[in-house]
Amino acid sequence: MTSLSRRNLLRAGVAGGVAGVLFEAPAFSSAGTRPVLTHGVQSGDATADSAVVWSRADRPGRLWVQVSRRPDFRGSRVVRGPVLTPATGLTGKLKLGHLPAGSRLHYRVRAESLDRPGLFSAPLTGSFTTAPVRRENIRFVWTGDVVGQGWGIDPAYGGLKIFASMRRRRPDFFLHSGDTVYADGPLAESVTLPDGRVWRNVVTEQKLKVAETLDEYRGQYAYNLLDPAYRAFAAEVPQLNQWDDHEVTNNWYPGEILDDARYTEKRVDVLAGRAHQAYHEWVPTPLGEGPVYRKISYGPLLDIFVLDMRTYKDVNDGNTYADPKRGLLGPKQREWLIRGLRESRATWKVIANDLPLGLVVPDGGAAQEGVAQGDPGAPLGRELEFAQVLRDAHRHRVTGIVFLTADVHYTAAHHYDPARAAVQDFTPFWEFVSGPAHAGAFGPNALDGTFGPKAVFVNAPPVANASPASGFQHFGEVEIDARTGAFTVHLRDREGKSLWSTTLGVMR
């Protein structure tokens, strides 16, 4: 069972008044008592006619969701959900269908007792916006990297304050660009800051060591949901989540064997299997066993291609090979992306890449974690598959491609132009970087010249692993104007202040 020190248990209560912060089933009999929804509600993958709704109870029970156009739930529809069992850590989610497009919808979640049918938990409410099918204004936010490098929830420093700032922007959805948790990042109860102040983490048992067991991976997500700003944001903004490395362990790839004394289980494939289960239990991802990569359409103005740059990833070597069959995406995903871009009729095609395209991201020594490797010449290694994607889009006159990413723990705007590149058969495009949401800040990383990037804006800390208290936490915001189709990007800080912005016009 999860345990908290008395001091940190009290601090967790101060942080959000969380009922039932423990996430394992209680040891006592619950017969005759009401279930409790322990970690709030979340929604995700909101399309024009559907959305996923999530919650978790403190004991086995049946999930029920009520949905309405109105906050008073008049004219509502009630949907019977799954039974919550220990097999899924008492979490559950269901897909609401037949929803009106481009609408703000309200939902109410309850858990029904299995011991006493008809006995329900107190309700929790949330809301989400479905995707439009017509030209409508669109606003969304993105960032990545939550509770990393030892920086957990400290109420004295605002907890996960950036989520309150993003919530104030009233986005239609949130693109979470990976590292939803740091399963490999244990927390200490306190950290002394450079100026002598003390950062005091709320700590749970599952955050005291690297995650290896299924329950330890579950505990990573349970921890983040202790924060009231995070829970309030999750209840009101539908998510679009990406699977990345820290959900398992740093810079992992399939087949890897760890050389890390912190782990008793060295096989990454075993760890990834457990982490994958916990991720889909605790994150409002689509139901089913399909691939993690997917496309979400937001009417005639926007298609989002959410990549999976982890499941099919090749080994982290020097990344200078000439084998076109290797890469980050794998052949099926690569062809899916090429075909999807070619067939898309949306004005803007956002490629959500949780690893940046042109930034060099080393993995110790000569090994490379990302797409680039620092050689500014013709495409090599993982650059080959992105050269293929960009070349095909150029030859088929695909316009409006924008890359959105996180990963490197600072914010930046990169413009790519064949006039500066080692290859010329692609159309100029932008890549915008934002993060971290709540983790150590780093950077900036070196740019690889293969695709001709230019750093137009960078905001990075002067020292590595700067704490969230230092101010170098970031999120990005996109606004698409329904009338003109213009695509405006703001790179914002933890408070929501715009540090830099640009507006991209529609190419004719």
Image: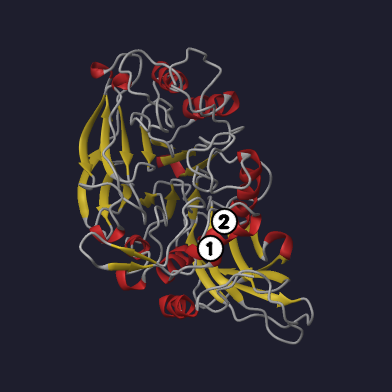
Q: Secondary structure at mark 2?
A: loop
Task: Tell me which corner region of the image, top left, top right, bottom left or bottom right, holds residue 155.
Answer: bottom left
Instruction: Give the quarter of the image for residue 236.
Output: bottom left
Question: Which numbered disc flags the more N-terminal residue, 1 or 2?
Answer: 1
- Classify mark 1: helix, strand or loop: strand
Q: Callout 2 environment at 10 Å: few (<14), some (14 to 19), or many (20+)?
A: many
Residue neighbourhood size for the residue with mark 1, other residues' Cα within 10 Å, grouped as few (<14), some (14–19), many (≥20):
many
Numbered disc total: 2
Mark identifier at residue 42: 1
Callout 1–callout 2 Cβ contact below 8 Å: yes
Of residue 175 and residue 362, the one placed in the foreground of this image is: 362
Q: Name the residue that disc number 2 marks.
A: 284
The amino acid at mark 2 is Pro
Instruction: Judge left or right: residue 304 versus residue 79.
Output: left
Q: Which mark is residue 374?
A: none
Q: Residue furthest bottom?
A: 32
**Whole-percent x and y of residue 442?**
29, 45
Q: Is residue 210 above or below residue 230?
A: above
> Which quarter of the image is occupied by the N terminus?
bottom right
Front residue of 368 and 163: 368
| Residue 104 makes an appearance in the image | no
Q: Is residue 331 visible?
A: yes
Residue at x-position 35% and y-position 14%: 425
